[in-house]
Image (cartoon, grey):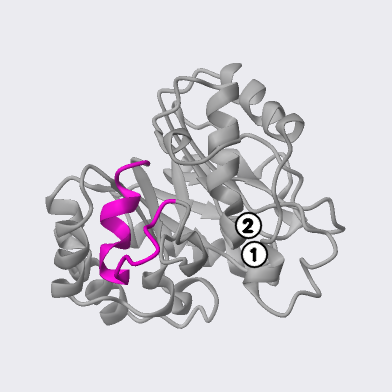
Amino acid sequence: MGTGGYSNEDWRGIVYPENAKRSEFLRYYSLYFNAVELNVSFYVVPGRKSVEGILKNSGDLKFSVKLPSFMTHDLSASGEDYTGFLKAMEPFEEAGKLGVYLAQFPYRFKNTPENRRYIASLSEVFRDRRLAVEFRHSSWDTPDTNPWLEGMGIFRVSSDYPPLRNLPIPALHVVRGFAYVRLHGRNTEKWWRGRDQRERHDYRYSYEELALWVAAVKGKPIREIWIIFNNTTKGHAIYNICMMKKLWPDLPTTVERVVRC
């Protein structure tokens, strides 16, 4: 249980002390959650020393590492790029703290033969590692998509999006007892028209909306599940995790100690 990233200035006064240094954010974060999506890897591949520094402040956290944009958006990665990236991630793997690699594909990445070949090649690069893929175009909502991914050992992310045309329909995908849920918020007004990601994810789920996911999860034979809230703007994710804890008391979070929901 955790959030997409943790370097949020507007979390000061919520889970971070007002006077906390940014270098202390992850340490405070680890007091309330047991998982986090690493966002920095999407923009730049961190060096080994940076990764070791992250680990030093991570407590008992498990990490989901987002693949760099040149692997999922530009589709321009070379063999050396893949080797360098996996080399940089070795400290996470050696510490037993890397739970899953996350390939977040953009809306323009549609269900085409060419893109299927690309995912197949990605499965070879991450062979023997847990790889989850997230699609943002509804063309992937076909009966054969999940079995095809499972055949390559890839997990499909269960994403919650606004109810907008051509976005995938929210659904829980469970493969071999594993599920990865990402909740992005349902800001229909700003999803396409927002100035930036902060506006896109400016949304707080209701108890009724969260209860649907809790019910879906409890009805499946799941051994391990990652629940990641990506609506981090204004601390919405923090409050929603607190709310979900009320609906599902067994969730591994203690954020209810510091926020009211």
Q: Secondary structure at mark 1?
A: helix
Q: In the visual, does 120 lie left or right of 47?
A: right
15 up-or-down from 209: above or below: below
Q: Position of residue 190 (x, y in %)?
A: 79, 68
Q: Position of residue 172 (x, y in %)?
A: 63, 34
* Residue ID at (40%, 23%): 223
Residue holding disc 2: 135
55 up-or-down from 153: above or below: below
Residue type beneath disc 2: Phe
Q: Nearer the viewer, residue 178 or 150?
A: 178
Q: Nearer the viewer, residue 99 or 40?
A: 40
State the separation of the CA atoms marked 2 and 1: 15 Å
- Circles 2 and 1: CB distance less than 8 Å? no
Q: Secondary structure at mark 2?
A: loop
Residue 113: mark? 1
* Residue ID at (57%, 24%): 246
Assign the N terminus to one quadrant of the image.
top left
Q: In the visual, does 95 lie left or right of 103?
A: left
Whether residue 17 appears in magenta in the rendering, the answer is yes
Assign the C terminus to one quadrant of the image.
top right
Magenta region:
15-32
Q: Position of residue 11 (x, y in %)?
A: 48, 59
Q: Nearer the observer, disc 2 or disc 1?
A: 2
Q: Nearer the viewer, residue 111 or 240?
A: 240
* Residue ID at (30%, 79%): 81
